[in-house]
Image (cartoon, rainbow, N blue to C red):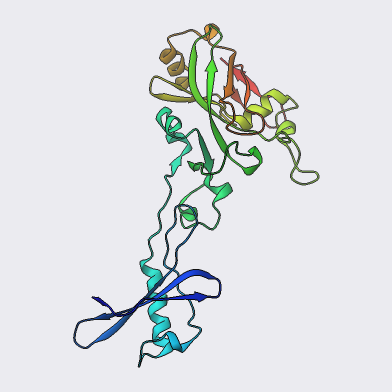
Amino acid sequence: MLAIALTPTLHQGYDNLWIVPFLRMASPVRWRCLAWRRCSLPFTQASQPCRIQSTALLPSGMHKDYYETCLRSAKGSRKVLTPELKQLVDLTYSDFQRYSVWVGVHNLDYGKPWYDKSDESTYRPNTEPLPVAAERGAVLVRASFVLCDGGRYHGFVRAASPSWDVPLRKGMATALSLSGGDSAHALMGIQQPHIFVAQDTFCFWGGVGGVASEKRQRFYAALGRPAEAVFPIAFAADAGLATGLTDGEVRGFYRMVLGQPTETTI
């Protein structure tokens, strides 16, 4: 393929647009056209089609409609660099060693090419300046855990907004009202701290279903400690990673009972 011309032009709505006609040396001779611009969006490099504003840019003998069709066809070959995506249950100790903050795709990436392939449990490494505002959505930050007997472990916690119990709309139920009025238990349902022990990850919040007995026993076995040496567990996020509420105390394994106090089991 032989490049015939390289014509930079200023196009409405585009910076640094290049119109590049190519001549394919084949029979019959055909023109192939490609247009692109540099894209400053994170993780994205894209070929963007455009409307031709002036026939002065067209190679001799090339019809404007055909040229625009060529430009539109470039869209199909555009290369999109997708960020690293992981489900909540798949996040590990090494992930938080590589990136201290992970953010929810469904909170921050609406309209991005990878959005439709994600769900509410999909996360990617944070790319914004620290600290990340808890109000942005699901912000998971690296944290430290201290057991009742002084044992220390790593994990992560979701940063909770200081206004975590303000209803989104008047009359709407809040985490506090759903938990029977226990603010510490209600906040636990938002922060949902996770701890890393022996290549495994354990969460203390079990939602309506609770944490299965088998999972609880596996947790104690991994620690090599009885329950009385474990709880309460103090946790706190590393400094400077996120705003909001990022510390607290775990009193056991939690199960939410709608409209009643949250149950705690050890």
- Nearer to me, 26 or 107: 26
Q: Position of residue 115 (x, y in %)?
A: 50, 53
Task: Check the picture and name the quadrant holding the C terminus.
Answer: top right
User: Looking at the image, is 99 positioned above or below residue 38?
Assistant: above
Query: Which residue occupies the foreground of this view, 2 or 229?
Result: 2
Residue 212 seen: no
The residue sitting at 45% across, 18% down in the picture is 219
The front one of 97 and 119 is 97
Which quadrant is home to the N terminus? bottom left
The x and y percentages for residue 75 are 41, 70
Lateral position of residue 24 relative to residue 67, left or right: left
**Considering only vertical position in the picture, is 22 above or below 229?**
below
Q: Residue at 71% across / 35% down in the picture?
A: 164
Query: Most extreme residue toward the right, as rendered?
Result: 170
Camera sees residue 150: yes
Picture quadrant where residue 224 is located: top left
Up the image or down, 138 lies above or below 50; here it is above
Residue 58 screen position, x and y as percent: 40, 86
Give the quadrant of residue 22: bottom left
State how many labels appear. 0
Q: Which residue is rendered at x = 39% and y = 91% of the image?
A: 63
Residue most extreme to the left: 27
Residue shown at the point (42%, 63%) measured from the top left:
46
Q: Position of residue 11 (x, y in %)?
A: 51, 75
